[in-house]
Image (tube, rainbow, N blue to C red):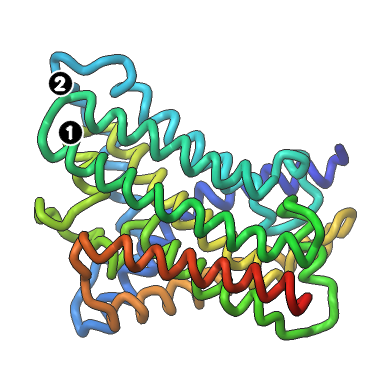
Amino acid sequence: MTRLGVVSQLLEIGLALLLAPLLSGWINQCRAWLQNKSAPGFLQPYRLLHKLFNKESVVAEHASPLFRSAPYIVFGCMALACAIVPTLSTDLPLSPAADAIALVGLFALARVFISLAAMDIGTSFGTLGARREMLIGFLAEPALLMVLFSASLISKSTSLTTIVETLAHRDMAIYPSLAFAGVAFTMVSLAENARVPVDNPATHLELTMIHEALILEYSGRHLALLEWAASLKLFAYSCTGLALFFPWGVAEAEAPLALLVAMPMLVLKLAIGGALLAFLETLSAKMRIFRVPEFLATAFLLAVIGLLVNILVGA
């Protein structure tokens, strides 16, 4: 463990905590621009978090300790997921734990706790949201694993740092397997982050909402942690996509100057990715919940095709 590695790790965590709400605000702003609407400023997510942290948390009378501890567990899982994804440098103390399976496991652990907490109070909306969340997770996690395995076949390792080092420092080449995997990853990201066409983060309609149904009973600092965790999840998925498909600009080990270049590169790539996500959401229509399994099954099929192309063609 080098001193530069510790600095890189702390910078990654700090940037994730700082930029995750800003990324959500940027996407909302771009989406409003594309729809010819007026939207709050980029800093609105920070104002919302500040307001919620200064409010008292109201907890149901029969809530168990699971309900109170779930926001902290979910937030911790999302922060750790952002920490093990190599966004600035591949020299990270957590790189031995930065495995593709471990990343998917963190997302699954957070999903289980937020779903159990939503059912803990016993409200109909919480149970409805928990069932839908587990349905989406059950279908999205295998597709995400297939996407990560497609990239791991190229680097011969499931370590995220090894994958990034291999893809970033090889000659420019077109990998057909990564093309299929990229489309599948985009579809999974939309479903996992409650974005259109799977879910609409701006609605509270009981027949369509998924993420909002999970957190209806939370308030105050608990709600703030869950909203922050949702932004961190979007940030983690965005950085995972950049690390797999656009890894250029990530610093190597023992390269302090490259680390300074990696920070503005990361911000630029996130800004472009956020604008593209808003554009994709504007072009899409919200689908019925019964069509979501077909949507995610298509993503899984594309990921498997990418995996088979890599095995058969070797590219």
Please state which of residues 10 and 302 is positioned toward the viewer in this rendering.
Answer: 302
- Number of marks drawn: 2
Q: Which residue occupies 29% across, 23% down?
A: 67
**Which numbered disc, 1 or 2, marks the residue that appears first in the sequence?**
2
Please state which of residues 225 and 154 is positioned toward the viewer in this rendering.
Answer: 154
Mark 1: give few (<14), some (14-19) or many (20+) Cα within 10 Å: some
Q: Which residue occupies 47% across, 35% down?
A: 109
Please name the residue that numbered disc 2 is placed on.
60
If the image is split into quadrants, where does the N terminus sit? Answer: top right
Inspect the image, locate mark 2, and give the three-letter code of the amino acid beneath it.
Ala
Disc 1 secondary structure class: loop
For the residues labelled 1 and 2, the Cα–Cα distance comes to: 8 Å
Q: Which mark is residue 71?
A: none
Please name the residue that numbered disc 1 is placed on.
217
**Where does residue 120 sit, x and y in percent of width and height?**
23, 24
Taking the image as drawn, is residue 102 in sight? yes
CB under 8 Å between discs 1 and 2: yes
| Above/below status of 254 relative to 13 | below
**Where does residue 191 sit, x and y in percent of width and height?**
36, 60
Q: Which residue occupies 66% across, 59% down?
A: 149
Inspect the image, locate mark 1, and give the three-letter code of the amino acid beneath it.
Glu
Please state which of residues 42 and 57 is positioned toward the viewer in this rendering.
Answer: 57
